[in-house]
Amino acid sequence: MAAPDAPAGHLLVVDDDDRIRGLLKQYLARSGFRITTASDAASARRLLELFEVDLLVLDVMMPGETGFELAAWLRAQPGRKGRTPVLILTARDQPTDRIEGLSLGADDYLAKPFEPQELVLRISAILRRTGAASERPARLSLGRCLFDMERGELFRDDEPVRLTEAEAQLLRRLGREPHTPVERHLLSNGADEGSGRSVDIQVTRLRRKIEADPKNPRYLQTVRGVGYMLAPDR
């Protein structure tokens, strides 16, 4: 169960232990978070260069670059990325380790073994404090088009554009996490036995409605090997 009034958020879990990484993904997903995982710092960096997340859950002792080194790199990044909240989750629980992690800009430090419910409460507290999982805009600007998230209505130059229910749901799902790639199987809702073919058809139709050049989309983008991303003006 999620913590009461816990803000939803997209978390990146970085841990080299397959078992712990899997358990964290399962538990945090059940608590209402969207989870992406990485097995080392290099993989995490590549993901962070593709999209933004609301918080990192970061192990320290990993092969190659340590979690402390990744946290230092992240804090050196410009803009919102450099302010991404970090919770360090590690077996290193000496006071000097905690001081080092917090001095590098971590928002919290939790030692293993830990209570899963405490982890959820700490993550939720960080997200509330930082506003990282703030409320998404009610309307999305897509060039000449405007999409009303609540009503599921699309307008071009103030004129209504007809959407099917499936198209409206797809825009809502992508609009909840703008500028963040969403995997195709998460957009398909189990349709076509997970193949995502119906999603591809809906994307093609939507591009004809919102893009100036559907063959070179500006707003409804394909993220190779992942899925699709909505990139509104605001």
Image (spheres, rainbow, N blue to C red):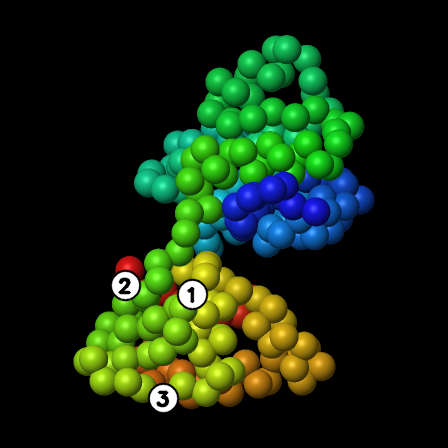
Give the numbered dot on residue 162. 3
Q: Which quadrant is the C terminus positioned in? A: bottom left
The amino acid type found where label 1 is placed reads Gly
Residue 43 visible in the current orientation: no
Side of 123 relative to 27 (left or right): left
Secondary structure under tag 1 reads helix
Gap between marks 3 and 1 measured at Cα: 18 Å
Q: Which image quadrant for residue 148?
A: bottom left
For disc 2, the marked residue is: 233
Residue positioned 33% across, 40% down in the render: 79
Residues marked 2 and 1 touching at CB (< 8 Å):
no
The amino acid type found where label 2 is placed reads Asp
Callout 3 crowding tier (Cα within 10 Å): few <14, some 14–19, many ≥20: few
Return the residue nearer the eye: 219 or 43: 219
The amino acid type found where label 3 is placed reads Arg
Q: How many marks?
A: 3
| Residue 215 locus on image (x, y percent) | 35, 84
Above or below: residue 194 compared with residue 80? below
Side of 234 relative to 186 (left or right): left
Gap between marks 2 and 3 measured at Cα: 21 Å
Residue positioned 23% across, 85% down in the render: 159
For disc 1, the marked residue is: 175
Gap between marks 2 and 1 measured at Cα: 12 Å
Q: Earlier in the sequence, mark 3 or mark 1?
A: 3
| Residue 52 locus on image (x, y percent) | 45, 50
Looking at the image, the residue that sits furthest to the front is: 4
| Residue 199 locus on image (x, y percent) | 54, 81
